[in-house]
Amino acid sequence: MRWRDRFEFVGEAIQKAEQETGERKGHYLNVTAATPEEMYKRAEFAKEVGSPILMHDFLTGGFTANTGLANWCRDNGMLLHIHRAMHAVIDRHPKHGIHFRVLAKCLRLSGGDHLHTGTVVGKLEGDRNSTLGFVDQLRESFVPEDRSRGVFFDQDWGSLPGVFAVASGGIHVW
């Protein structure tokens, strides 16, 4: 099934489930693509089928593409969920790489409404203090130095919008 067929199928399934249950349902349609042009084509189609939220893999899609999509979503009244596909290749090796805290900060600068952050328990488990440290970096306008959370200097985000930290499977991040 290609992306267009999948988007239509999901849109129909959501409508059917809402009618049957009387509850609001949703799904994040992944618009990540090889080119920004293709990504915007998918975003437009997702909007046409009634999706209020798009998903983008910000590491595989790239920061510039992510910023463009974040702006497009704001202009079109849609939310942007950010997935972190491929992050483990960058941030999980203990002797090299980039800590997820840095990737989270880059994402906040790039734009997005919520980020798949992992949790302090489960499959995406991380150190509790470290996880809370980068969650603070995502959502707070000012984050004071707290070395126990991996925050080595005060971070003033000014008026830059925050990013809501979410975990998979309905698990609370903290």
Image (tube, grey):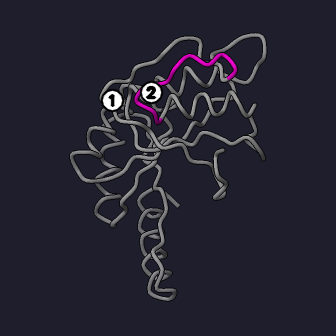
For the C terminus, the quadrant is top right
1 or 2: mark nearer the eye = 1
Earlier along the polypeptide chain: callout 1 or callout 2? 2
Circle on res. 160: 1
Residue located 70% across and 29% down the image: 129
Q: Residues within 10 Å of mark 2 (few under 14, many from 20)?
A: some
The part of the image, by quadrant, that contains residue 34 is: top left
Counting labels gives 2
Residue located 40% across and 36% down the image: 162
> How far from the left and from the top, in percent, is residue 64?
36, 25
Q: From what the image shows, is residue 158 above or below residue 162? A: above
Query: In the image, which residues are magenta?
Result: 139-148
Circle on res. 49: none
Q: Residues within 10 Å of mark 1 (few under 14, many from 20)?
A: few
Can you name the residue that lies furthest to the bottom here? 20
Helix, strand, or loop for circle 1? loop
> How far from the left and from the top, in percent, is residue 141?
40, 30
Does the magenta segment cover residue 107?
no
Indicate the amino acid at tag 1.
Answer: Leu
Which residue carries the number 2 mark? 62
Question: Disc 1, disc 2: CB below 8 Å?
Answer: no
Determine the CA span between mark 1 and mark 2: 20 Å
Comparing 32 with 54, the one in front is 54
Residue located 48% across and 41% down the image: 82
Q: From what the image shows, is residue 15 above or below residue 55? A: below
Indicate the amino acid at tag 2.
Answer: Gly
Helix, strand, or loop for circle 2? loop
> How far from the left and from the top, in percent, is residue 150?
65, 19
- Please state if 64 lies on the left or on the right of 58 as rendered: left
